[in-house]
Image: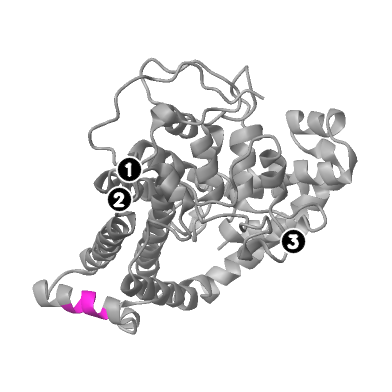
Amino acid sequence: MDTATGDRQNSAPAPWRASYAADPAASRGRLVAEPPSATRTEFQRDRDRILHSTAFRRLAHKTQVFVPYEGDHYRTRLTHTIEVSQIARAISRVLGLDDDLAEALALGHDLGHTPFGHTGEDVLDELMTGHGGFDHNAQALRIVTKLEHRYAAFDGLNLTWEALEGLVKHNGPLLRADGGPAPRYAGRGLPVAVTEYAAKHDLSLASFASAEAQAAALADDIAYNAHDLDDGLRAGLFDFADLAAVDFLHEILRRIEQRYPDLERPRRIHEVTRRVIAYFIEDAIAESRRRLTGLKSAEDVRAQSAPVVGFSEAAERVDKQLKLFLLEHMYRHPRINGVRVKAAEVIRALFPAFLDNPGLMPGEWALAAKTRVKGQGQLARLVCDYIAGMTDRYALAEHQRLFDVTPELR
């Protein structure tokens, strides 16, 4: 195995980059050696490869919370990703981190999501019981290391070690110091895709990822808290009177009303959203600066026992309150649950149909099933990969092709 990148760039460290930031000129390299780019750093190259990938384009037609038929102005998985990227760059730039790496990780963090949001993920995980299950973070790793077929010299995108560790560990270490699975994987073990890849390319699964990866993960929380409030208000799942039950939101509404007493509804919604985002970004920057004090290198970041990019205790409490509010008023709303039930029916019908008759899949997938798959487990993973990569509308189209009646997701 060759993990070199070729001749490393000899440019001096950027003057704005903090000592604890990831340095593209000191990258641990790529699984397949490549000469350096003449015009881009290693992390800029990672970002561009993710941005130009097929999986990234598909995010435009994958559900965030609302399926596309609800309206054109609600977030999709792609618009969510773009918002996460903007917030990750903002936090990283102020903290002196490499914002290109943070952006790359933000752009790639949801590549492994299925059609129909978390409903698709939950159903595929259930259907893959006995075959390694399904995890969208592990699926993102499969996409960037295996499933994207763009380059002549390798499968996947051949991203840097730092990008791969960030995609896998942005939510924290996957292993304990003693080698056992981290608490969130204690009941079922690590995802198969992660263990298979780590066997040939060690991603240091027991340590934290870079500060850039942590910034991207925090940006994800900030983005979906804020934009789910925005989408939920505009969709009429809850109203301003409901927001007042959360002290933090009640205070925001009071200040808006005080300053703009006659503000029309659309602008009022946006004022709430922008103030929520600003609060969490400003808190994250202040708290992270405190935690980063005294750290001298990116390896110092990885060696910590807790994240170095995060919220203060006060903001953590607000974050939990917002998540609970959204769980009760949005994610469990009858209107949303009704669509989820129908979406689950689609996935549950497609999976056994392709598993029983792989020839029903398109050419390259059917050929792979015929020539490269050995055993039921590998076939199930191939079918899972195919379905996980579908957009919402393509999944519905495949269901319509194979079955007489397809649920209407409304």
Which residue occupies the foreground of this view, 221 or 59? 221
Label 2 close to label 1 by CB (< 8 Å): yes
Residue at the right extreme?
375
Classify 10 Å Cα crowding around label 1: few (below 14), some (14-19), many (20 and above): many
Which numbered dot is residue 126?
3
Residue at 58% from the left image edge and 26% from the top image edge: 3
Say whether residue 384 is left or right of residue 229.
Answer: right
Q: Is residue 394 visible?
A: no
* Whether residue 369 is situated above or below residue 193 in the rendered picture: above
Q: Please tell me which of labels 3 and 1 falls first in the chain.
A: 1
- Disc 1 residue type? Leu
Res 36 label: none
Query: Which label lies toward us, 3 or 1?
Result: 1
Describe the element under mark 1 as helix, strand or loop: loop
Q: CA distance from mark 2 to mark 1?
A: 8 Å
N-terminal-most mark, 3 or 2 = 2
| Residue pointed to by mark 2 | 91
Q: Disc 3 and disc 1: Cα gap in Å?
A: 39 Å
| Residue 69 image position (x, y, % from top left) | 50, 56
Q: Which residue is mark 1?
A: 97
Whether residue 349 appears in magenta in the rendering, the answer is no
Which residue shows up at 67% across the image and 25% down it?
A: 1
Magenta residues, start to end: 250-254
Which percent across, then down, holds residue 139?
A: 63, 46
Name the residue type under label 3: Glu
**Does label 2 or label 1 sit earlier along the sequence?**
2
Q: Residue 155 is drawn in which quadrant?
A: top right
